[in-house]
Image (cartoon, rainbow, N blue to C red):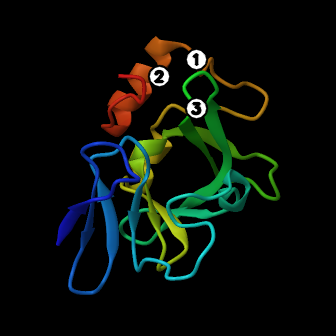
Amino acid sequence: MSKQDPNLPEGTTLTTGGTGSLSTAGTRGAKIEGTPEETPGPGPRIMAASTLEGDEVRNRQGEKLGTLEEIMLDVGSGRIAYAVLATGGFLGIGDKLFAIPWPALTLDTDNECFILDVDRERLQNAPGFDKNHWPAMADERWASELHRYYGTDPYWS
């Protein structure tokens, strides 16, 4: 069953299956899968960014890819531009970082993690950086290439 939620952008639908699961489609944000929360308060559609940092990111095969290190905002538009995924390393030392377009992620509320639909090899070959050498994230050419790599539409288009 699908319906338009008046609190979501035009074209966004909430879909519930026979299991009562919740997913969003037609947005430029992260998708949400899982059983909807019935309690009042934040989550899963509106959450504090700080509650997401440190969350595990897994692929569809259930393999841990890393953890959410940062959430990057486009201050001018008020949108989430990227999540920064940290992989490898130990206690933050030697981590390789990846900017992940926000729409490439799915919040899995049942398993309390994010899903990135890539295998380990694709992620390892993705453009990455270390904590002392961040890319120019406001560079539209860099951002367009990143969105192409992950198969997402840029949030500004």
Instruction: Identify the residue shown where x is 58% and y is 17%.
Output: 138
Q: What numbered label is drawn on residue 115? A: none
According to the picture, the residue beneath numbered tag 2 turns out to be: 143
Q: Position of residue 104 (x, y in %)?
A: 40, 46
Are circles 1 and 2 on residues that touch, CB within 8 Å? yes
Q: Could you say whether the residue bearing mark 1 is in a helix, strand or loop? A: loop
Query: Which one is in front, 48 or 127?
Result: 48
The residue identified by callout 1 is: 138
Q: Secondary structure at mark 3?
A: loop
Secondary element at image label 2:
helix
Mark 3 / mark 2, whichever is N-terminal: 3
On the image, the x and y values in percent for residue 61 come to 37, 70
Quadrant showing the C terminus: top left
Q: Residue at coordinates 27% horizontally, 47% vertically from top-left?
A: 26
Q: Is residue 83 or residue 21 the one in the foreground?
A: 21
Q: Amino acid at mark 1?
A: Ala
Disc nearest the viewer among 3 and 1: 3
Marks 3 and 2, how far apart at CA: 17 Å
Which tag, 1 or 2, sits closer to the chain's start?
Answer: 1
The residue that label 3 is drawn on is 78
How crowded pointer 2 is (Cα within 10 Å; few <14, some 14-19, many 20+) is rated as: many
**Residue 79: horizontal and vertical position, in percent?**
54, 35
